[in-house]
Image: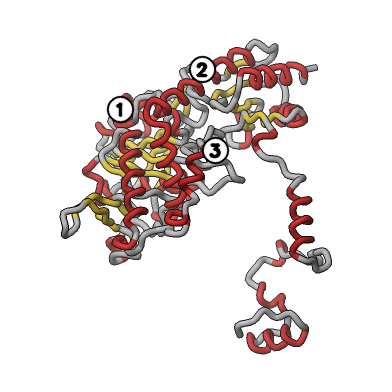
């Protein structure tokens, strides 16, 4: 029946056709406790002009990031996006082509994916990268599965300094694959090297750390990587704030075997948690174990440069038992945004942005630490995020800050009970000195 039932008679005809006595039967699979039992209380029918006015009035009650000074990070970052990113991203040939199932028909999109892969390799210091993945959390989990399959081992070691939500996703994946998770402790805001040594065993497929870690602290990758390799385990590094790689040495320089992470910070705006895009880069030896697809450079029959899907290890393309993953999209539009951003910024622009983040974060940490009752929780090098111990509830402080149009820090107590009175603050190039000073003054004014 190819019509929308508008009248009572049409609705009844549709229900007869479907063999149901009421519309609610269509939702029987939805738990009754979460179903809406009240009328939706929609307004009376309107003309298109009236609807536009009505929706405009509703949307005017919303805020956008420009209305606030934002000091919230914890995995999603507010960075400057050059206007050229959107101008190119929204061109029809990119905006509508989505993902190239028939490679020869999508040369432009395949080229953009090839450029994305190349830039991710340069950024991470690795040999090969795939077309992008869903997000950082699933990319990390895919790296763990890659390690387990490659080593034929059943334990995954991960530091508690890795983003807690990423660890939750990993546990879900691990449960489905029968993998055991070994979490290692922290010491002064860094992965505890002694605990890693103690817990490493023959069944450990990989060791996973975050760089910079969840608290913004810069891990000792070389030492952890050496421990992993001595144990014949794969060393996986997770990068959630890729702008940091404009300033810090890439994980590949410290012996990382697989580098995964989140590329939202590269030209993608904050939008209620998504959409994001994950990335994965590896040493050449793991190339055929990478999930998703790889776009490669080739020559056509005329000797002209062309692009092709070189490797397709998805179950949609090969036999399920040989597939590395069932990842079925490459977040192509978000990856294109990241590609344009990196191309526009260049290595010098990216370095400058990273330096500004670093300098302003350290300025903010010093100013806040000078306020009575506030102090840095850790005494180790950090990038653009830092953990502050507060004299009263971070929730209460954030409520005060919000009243002054300031988005405060992340309340880490929800994931780390021992840090109940701590707040994770983030400073990027979008935070001016005057905004930082306003934050410090607002915090000080809120004290008894």
Query: Residues at badges 2 and 1 in contact (C-beta under 8 Å)?
Result: no
Q: How many other residues sit within 10 Å of disc 1, few (<14), some (14-19) or many (≥20)?
A: some
Pointer 2: what residue? 359
Q: Position of residue 369 (x, y in %)?
A: 62, 13
**Residue at 73% across, 49% down:** 59
x and y percentages locating residue 5 in the rendered image: 70, 81
Q: Secondary structure at mark 1?
A: helix
Question: In the image, is residue 39 above or below residue 87?
Answer: below
Q: Picture coordinates of residue 51 (x, y %)?
A: 76, 61
Q: Is residue 192 left or right of residue 430?
A: left
Could one spot residue 249 in this view of the protein?
yes
| Depth order, front residue of 61/178 | 61
| Residue designated by label 3 | 76
Left or right: 344 in relation to 281: right
> Vertically, is 372 above or below 183?
above
Question: In which quadrant of the rendered image does the N terminus lie?
Answer: bottom right
Separation (CA) of disc 1 from disc 3: 25 Å
Q: Quadrant of residue 21?
A: bottom right
Reply above or below: 344 against 390: below
Residue 171 seen = no
Q: Foreground mark, 3 or 2?
A: 2
Quadrant where the C terminus lies? Answer: top right
Mark found first going from the N terminus, 1 or 3 = 3
Q: Which residue is mark 1?
A: 254
Label 3: how many Cα within 10 Å (few below 14, some 14–19, many 20+) = many
- Marks 2 and 1, the one that precedes in the sequence: 1
Q: Secondary structure at mark 3?
A: loop
């Amino acid at each position: 029946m190819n019509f929308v039932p508008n009248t009572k008679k049409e609705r009844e005809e549709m229900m007869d056709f479907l063999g149901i006595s009421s519309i609610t039967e269509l939702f029987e699979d939805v738990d009754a406790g979460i179903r809406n039992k009240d009328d939706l209380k929609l307004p009376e029918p309107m003309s298109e002009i009236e609807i536009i006015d009505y929706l405009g009035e509703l949307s005017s009650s919303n805020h956008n990031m420009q209305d606030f000074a934002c000091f919230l990070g914890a995995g999603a970052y507010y960075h400057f996006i050059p206007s050229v990113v959107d101008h190119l991203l929204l061109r029809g040939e990119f905006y509508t082509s989505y993902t190239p199932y028939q490679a020869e028909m999508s040369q432009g999109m395949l080229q953009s994916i090839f450029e994305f892969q190349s830039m991710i390799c340069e950024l991470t210091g690795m040999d090969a990268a795939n077309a992008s993945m869903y997000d950082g959390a699933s990319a990390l989990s895919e790296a763990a599965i890659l390690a387990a399959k490659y080593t034929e081992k059943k334990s995954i070691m991960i530091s508690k300094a890795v983003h807690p939500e990423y660890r939750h996703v990993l546990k879900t994946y691990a449960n489905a694959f029968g993998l055991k998770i070994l979490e290692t402790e922290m010491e002064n805001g860094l992965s505890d090297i002694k605990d890693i040594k103690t817990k490493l065993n023959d069944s450990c497929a990989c060791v996973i750390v975050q760089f910079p870690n969840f608290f913004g602290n810069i891990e000792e990758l070389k030492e952890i990587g050496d421990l992993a390799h001595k144990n014949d385990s794969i060393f996986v590094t997770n990068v959630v704030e890729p702008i940091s790689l404009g300033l810090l040495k890439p994980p590949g320089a410290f012996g990382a075997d697989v580098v995964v992470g989140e590329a939202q910070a590269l030209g993608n705006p904050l939008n209620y948690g998504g959409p994001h895009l994950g990335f994965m880069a590896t040493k050449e030896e793991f190339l055929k174990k990478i999930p998703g697809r790889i776009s490669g450079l080739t020559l056509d029959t005329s000797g002209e440069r062309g692009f092709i899907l070189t490797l397709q290890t998805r179950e949609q393309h090969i036999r399920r038992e040989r597939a590395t993953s069932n990842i079925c999209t490459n977040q192509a539009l978000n990856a294109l945004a990241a590609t344009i951003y990196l191309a526009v910024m260049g290595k010098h622009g990216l370095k400058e942005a990273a330096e500004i983040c670093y300098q302003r974060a350290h300025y903010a940490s010093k100013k806040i630490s000078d306020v009575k009752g506030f102090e840095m929780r850790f005494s180790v090098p950090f990038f653009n995020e830092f953990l502050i111990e507060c004299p009263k509830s971070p929730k209460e402080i954030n409520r005060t800050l919000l009243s002054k149009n300031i988005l405060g820090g992340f309340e880490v107590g929800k994931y780390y009970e021992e840090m109940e009175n701590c707040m994770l603050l983030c400073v990027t190039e979008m935070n001016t000195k005057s905004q930082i000073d306003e934050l410090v003054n607002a915090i000080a004014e809120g004290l008894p």
